[in-house]
Image (cartoon, rainbow, N blue to C red):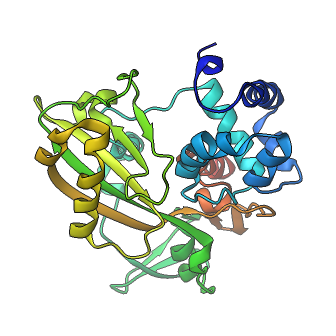
Amino acid sequence: FQTLASPVGTLADKLRIVDLIRRVQGMSSTDFFDQEPTTTLAYLTNMGFSERMLVRFFRPFFGGIFLEDGLQTSSNFFEFCFKMFFTGNAALPATGIQAIANQLASRIPAQQIRLNTRVARILGNQVITVAGETITAEAIVLAVDATQAAQLLNQPAPPETAFTHTTCTYFAAPASPKPATRHPERLLLLNTKRSAAVHNVAILTDVAPSYAPDGQALISVSTQGLEQVDEAALTQQIQRELPEWFGDGVMNWRYLRSYHIPHALPAYLPGRVRQPLQLATSLYQCGDHTAYPSLNAAMQTGRLVAEQLI
């Protein structure tokens, strides 16, 4: 009912949302990825969604998920994401994303974990480090990104078009800013003007207070489409745009850091084929580049490889 009353899209758009919910509710993850795909944009257009709905909701929200505003991502992955957001919650680990790795590492004796050791190549069931050390194992798992996997397998590196990219800029504020809207409780703010420097804003400490000291708020601003980043210019542009959202107090925010991530996600275009997890008798791979772009796929494929080994 809240959706039906919102100013985003027409009544017909909202009825089509109900149709979309009905469609994805009865489908399993396997069902999604076994379909003949098209692009997300074509899928939504064929369903009859208005241009207004595409501009005001689907492009800013799912463009932020896919890290590409053209909505050229496979419709199979769109349906999967739509169901995940509709049926579940988005979450942040209270102590940061590193908590996931820490949890896994806590079950392994510390002496079995080698950090800061670069691998040069793999020969059969042997790992050769840059330092020249040879490590022999019953099985080797490539838990790396697509570019590193290609390098270790002596294959051509994937092109830049195989990835989507993003830039995240972080600020500290003396208090949580409240957007100048009648819905101050919103946790994710979308900008329909995609030519701006500000695409999505998240006040992270409103979700996870542990992300900043007492008396401080942590704000994340996402910008898409930047091939190269001038941090000073980008920060100034963001601070020129955000007073319209939060008032002049933005000028007192303290800039922390910008992260430009050129290989943030593997691109997932229609027709993309899942890669095998077992490459040879003693060689396996996992990661979202083998399945679909997400933390979910990265951890899921890692678990599937572990189950095969067990």
Q: Is residue 134 visible?
A: yes
Q: Residue at x 52, y 67 (%)?
A: 145
Residue 7 percent coordinates (x, y): 58, 27
Residue at figure coordinates x 17%, y 41% from the top left: 248
Looking at the image, residue 262 lies above or below residue 70: below
Between residues 193 and 16, which one lies in front from this camera angle? 193
Nearer-the-camera pick, 154 or 45: 45
Q: As drawn, is 74 to the left or to the right of 225?
A: right
Seen as rendered, the residue at the extreme top is 1
Residue visible at 23% across and 53% down? Answer: 239
Q: Looking at the picture, does residue 144 appear above or below residue 45?
A: below
Quadrant where the N terminus sits is top right
- Identify the residue at image location x=83%, y=30%: 23
Q: Would residue 39 appear left or right of 65 to someone viewing this image? A: right
Relative height, residue 177 to residue 79 (above, below): above
- Find residue 46 and report its horizontal and vertical position in percent: 85, 46
The quadrant holding residue 255 is: bottom left
Q: Is residue 207 left or right of residue 135?
A: left
**Residue 166 placement (x, y as % from top left):** 44, 61
